[in-house]
């Protein structure tokens, strides 16, 4: 049986392996990386086959997952051009690199995938955008692979970068760190501040996801006119909270577009 081969053993590969093992995924997985120590750790922790030699890794691939930094994509794909001897399909996790550029550097069928690191817990979210020539059977295989670690969305490539800068779990972690830090300045100890901030963010959002009320209805319920929450949210808005978030997303979008020009 052909394997799913990861090129790159970094953070997102590690998160995916954790989620796949949690889900009981037992099909062949091979990981290639240039760092022998990293490969030893992945082999020990996630029971995967590791391969330091790139041609030997690629020779085992049915699906090839490109999991390297965007600034390394060009070199990796050029190195692969004369090493792929059998028909494979490609999955790129490289943010900002368009399908046309991937195909130009390595002429195989490609899909772009953007999985969240939260996939390590089985609660991830992955966006997919397929090239037109991606085989139907392989599309199903890719969808099922990422569904093992969370929800899957298919979106047009024209919206892919906007999704990438919006869906990141970094927003939640950053908000949690910011809110809990502000609460500590008001006198809460760190443990209590984190508990309060996590409830405000995670439990509130979970209530929206699992309940029957709209976001607007929940905001109306939580923010009583003239009350404490109203004072908090109106002050944050006056201090350009919305503009700061939008500016951050636009900066991320600019970085994604810069990746496409590498």
Image (cartoon, rainbow, N blue to C red):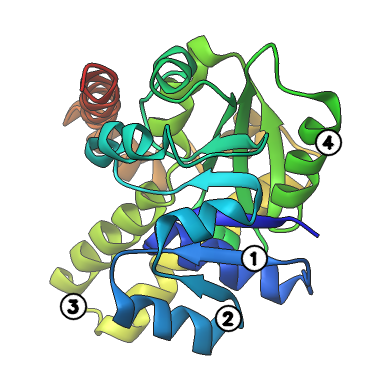
Relative placement, left or right, of 107 versus 78 is: right
Tell me the distance, in whole angstroms, between the alpha carbons under discs 1 and 2.
Answer: 10 Å
Give whichever of 244, 67 is nearer the camera. Answer: 67
Residue 118 in view (yes/no): yes
Above or below: residue 6 compared with residue 213: below
Q: Which callout, 3 or 4, points at the residue further toward the start of the chain?
A: 4
Left or right of 82 in this view: 191: left
Residue ID for mark 4: 140
Q: Is residue 121 visible?
A: no
Residue carrying label 2 = 46
| Mark 2 touches mark 4? (CB < 8 Å) | no
Residue that mark 1 sits on: 29
Callout 2 secondary element: helix
Closer to us: 241 or 224: 241
Disc 3: which residue: 187
The part of the image, by quadrant, that contains residue 110 is top right
| Callout 1–callout 2 Cβ contact below 8 Å | yes
Q: From what the image shows, is residue 8 above or below residue 242?
A: below
Q: Which is more N-terminal, label 3 or label 2?
A: 2
């Amino acid at each position: 049986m052909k394997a799913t081969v990861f090129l790159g053993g970094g953070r997102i590969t590690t998160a995916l392996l954790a989620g796949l093992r949690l889900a009981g995924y037992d099909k062949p997985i091979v990981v290639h990386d240039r760092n022998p120590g990293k490969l030893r750790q992945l082999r020990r922790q996630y029971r995967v086959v590791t391969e330091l030699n790139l041609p030997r890794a690629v020779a085992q691939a049915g699906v090839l997952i490109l999991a390297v930094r965007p600034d390394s994509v060009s070199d990796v794909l050029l190195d692969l051009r004369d090493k792929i001897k059998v028909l494979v399909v490609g999955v790129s996790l490289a943010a900002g690199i368009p399908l046309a550029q991937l195909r130009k550097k390595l002429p195989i069928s490609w899909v772009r995938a953007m999985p969240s690191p939260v996939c390590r817990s089985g609660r991830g979210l992955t966006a997919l955008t397929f090239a037109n020539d991606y085989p139907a059977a392989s599309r199903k295989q890719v969808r099922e692979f990422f569904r093992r670690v969370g929800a899957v969305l298919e979106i047009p490539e024209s919206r892919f970068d906007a999704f990438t800068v919006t869906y990141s779990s970094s927003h939640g972690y950053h908000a949690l760190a910011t809110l809990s830090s502000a609460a500590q300045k008001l006198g809460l100890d760190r443990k209590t501040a984190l508990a309060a901030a996590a409830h405000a963010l995670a439990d509130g959002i979970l209530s929206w996801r699992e309940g029957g009320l709209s976001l607007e209805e929940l905001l109306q319920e939580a923010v009583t006119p003239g009350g404490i929450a109203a004072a908090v949210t109106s002050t944050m808005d006056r201090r350009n909270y919305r503009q700061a978030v939008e500016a951050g997303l636009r900066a991320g979008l600019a970085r994604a577009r810069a990746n496409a020009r590498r």
